[in-house]
Image (cartoon, rainbow, N blue to C red):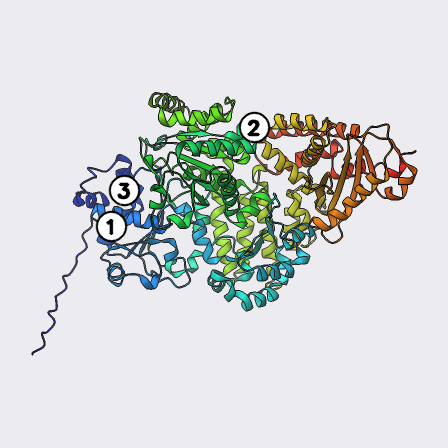
Amino acid sequence: MERKKFEFVKPKVVKAVEKDPESIFRELQIPNVKGLWSQQADILREYYNTFKTKQDVAIELPTGTGKTLIGLLIAEYRRRCHQERVLYLCPTRQLARQVYSKAKEYGLPASLLIGPQKSYPEDEYGNYVTNKTIAITTYSAIYNTNPKLDDADTILFDDAHSAENYISSLWTVEIKRKDNKDVFESIIELFKDDISDYHYTRIMSDDTDYYKPIYDLIPYPRYLEKLPQLIELLEANISKCGNAKHPWSKINENLEACQMFFSWGEINIRPLVPPTQTHVAFNKAKQRIYMSATLGEGGELERITGVRKISKIPIPKGWEKYSNGRRLILFPNRVFNPDDTLKVAIGAIQNQGRALVLCPDNRTAQYFISKFQKVLPEFNVLQSSDIEDSLDSFISKDKAVLVLTNRYDGIDLSGDICRLQIVFGMPEATNLQEGFLWNRLNANAVLSELVKTRITQALGRCTRASDDYANVIMIDPNLLKFCARRENLIGFHPEIQAEIEFGLSNSEKIDSIEQMVGFMNDFINDKEYYAAINDAITEIREEYEKKPKTEVQKLVLSVENEIDFVYALWKRELDRALEKVKSIIENLSGGKELNGYRAWWFYIAGNAAHLSKSKIAIDQNLDKSYYSSALRITSGVSWLSELIHHVPVDRNVPRADPYLATQIDNIEMVLSDLGIVGTMFEKNMKHLMELINEDDSIKFEKGMTELGKILGYDASRPKGDTTPDGVWILRDKFIGFEAKTEENEQDPVYSDACRQTDGHKKWIRENVSFPDGATVDAALISHKNSIRKDALPQSRELFHVSVKDIRELALKATSVLRGIRSVLVQEQGPNLFSKEHISNTLIAEKLTYKEIEEFIKSKLLEDLTQY
């Protein structure tokens, strides 16, 4: 039988015909979309007339106002009229499927390329390569070490601000304690001498329950000095560290351009900004388009993407005060303590059935889940892995809570799918670098813009259309403080400003948990009540307008030089790096608001100079000069009080007391937790005084713990019959207490009480993370003024404090904190001024740890009158 010849085809010559995106939309004749909304048409015209030839373009549109259609029309314009290969990137597979479904609905040619690269359908991949379709995929498709999709002419980044950790992860070596404990501890051990004993002991003692998180950074000169050993250690073990081997291959030849951050559970080695221009799959594109509900004002999109300048299409006229849907935003921390605040959230979930909970990190998420499941075990708790491909597992359940970590964008729960959203935790630290800058350096000028962006993104998760509505509960004292601060509030969209002001004003009027839960219930279920709330917010919205902070303009001026500096360091162009870092510092000069961020860049400049002095001809004291400037700006910052021991500095640089710096940090945290605004602070001070004025031992001991905390100690009351009645810790200084408040003041101190008090020193050494060289003291608290002679041998090196004196100390401490808080109310946020103010006040009022130690140790137990 004769073989039939293949019937070849003659390719048609495709002639590109220039058409603007609006014309393409009209041709599509989409059945369910009768026409473009005005803001969509405005954006498309602006793009076509002004921005189509620019390499990096950002588009801002509020949530639910048709961003996907705009992106797909631009993508089709580039594919059809410029014959380009086009990638449309989404944060998750579920969102990629959603966009693909929309493309098909609109009649646009699209290929869905998700999952393992080797499993891409050949025909779909071929259609993209030959420019027949738009490829819809995830960020990880191009941000990997060997991307198959490495030849796009145009890349669209949907939910661009969500891309932050997807992008930076390609240049961040993560060593996680839970996955690679041996490697993690070996690295910590390598840098043992460069870490405070306080942090080293906590990390190496499995101190998981410690309430205070660790964010730290290895001083660059020490990091550089031990780089050969670090490289050797990682080269030998990187294959055992999961995905870490991929970013290691990207940075292992540029480790001098990186820094090492660490926490209790993780080590990150990374550059300041991801050097994306060194990644072919990104750099090769003719045009990159970033779409987001909010672009921010301070250059954060440029820092996220590693691009020095992004042209921004402004929000369409008339939309500057409009946002989709209506939210009732409430702040339980305004009136309730942390336990009752959680009860509000749990009560609302029980009422409404389904809820979205957004957390900044896994630790916060696991804390919420553990508390929630104890109360409502019948509810299904879902996490990101459960909705990676579809939301069905959440939508199909009547009792379900979806808890997501660092996902403030890229999740759409419209209509009746979800009417309750909980923002649980301040979204200030989604990676270790951010956590360090925010918590250890107060370099939060640039991060506050990111926080504002994340809050804006978060608020759009459950309101996707103009007639959508949802309850939003903001849970975290710092979140309350951030939103209440006028300077931050005016940076939000006017609609959000109005909703936040409405929420703040009404939250403070609520008397009970039941009333707040009922308020939310009525908002959802009573149409007339909803309408009245909606009218009230709409009316006050007209009074607001968005006004960026003045210091934000300096951050914009700085960002191009910051990006240039990162690339210069990456390419080992040290002269250029030093030139750029000098310009950065000049641009950031003036105004205390930028002091923390400027100190950070003085530190970075010192690093660049330290690296350069052995490689190029420069002033050999330049690093010392820069490090000294960083230290002079930021008195009272605990990390810099440690840094002075690890970097070269001028002789006249003041040496901060690390104990005082830690005490200040702790007091600032207490004030933050109790709320710079609201009634929580006074309720807690009143409760503390009630406890400390009781002779009942249990109440008094609780009061002692609360007193220790407001004085800046890590204070606790261990459980058990033979444990101390209280332990106060400040770094490596430990004080244990035995309280005998119920005993008659006429009776002398007996030997049993002495033995108990002395035994607390041994208990502390054996049961608490105890650094080398730590000191431990113990004191007996009682009404007594005499001691039996036969108790003297057991009383040596123990101290006695009268109950009366403790109560006077508590009264003074609450009064001093009240005064500090009254000044900080004007600042309404953690910054370097607040640390200096706390420090100056403690010194003036003689309440530093030194005076407290002297107070506790002022009378030896053996010096009581002998009986």
Q: Secondary structure at mark 1?
A: helix
- Cα distance between the residues tagged 1 and 3: 12 Å
Q: Earlier in the sequence, mark 1 or mark 2?
A: 1
Q: Is residue 114 left or right of residue 309?
A: left
Q: In this view of the protein, which residue sits in the foreground, 39 or 440?
A: 440
Which residue is identified by label 2?
677
Q: Quadrant of the N terminus?
A: bottom left
Residue 175 found in image quarter: bottom right
Q: In this view of the protein, which residue sits in the foreground, 861 or 638?
A: 861
Q: Position of residue 830 (x, y in %)?
A: 58, 37
The amino acid sitting under disc 1 is: Glu
Residue 249 seen in this snapshot: yes
Which residue is identified by label 3?
44
The amino acid sitting under disc 2 is: Val
Vertical placement of 246 versus 666: above or below? below
Q: In this view of the protein, which residue sits in the foreground, 861 or 265?
A: 861
Q: Quadrant of the C terminus?
A: top right
Query: Which tag is nearer the camera, tag 1 or tag 2?
Result: 2
Q: Are marks 2 and 3 in contact (CB under 8 Å)?
A: no
Q: Which mark is residue 76?
A: 1
Residue occupying the far left of the picture? 1
The amino acid sitting under disc 3 is: Leu
Q: Residues within 10 Å of mark 1 (few under 14, many from 20)?
A: many
Q: Earlier in the sequence, mark 1 or mark 3?
A: 3
Vertical placement of 722 versus 221: above or below? above
Q: Earlier in the sequence, mark 2 or mark 3?
A: 3
Q: Position of residue 458 (x, y in %)?
A: 42, 39
Residue shown at the point (30%, 44%) measured from the top left? 68
Query: Which tag is nearer the camera, tag 2 or tag 3?
Result: 2
Q: Is residue 647 left or right of residue 105?
A: right
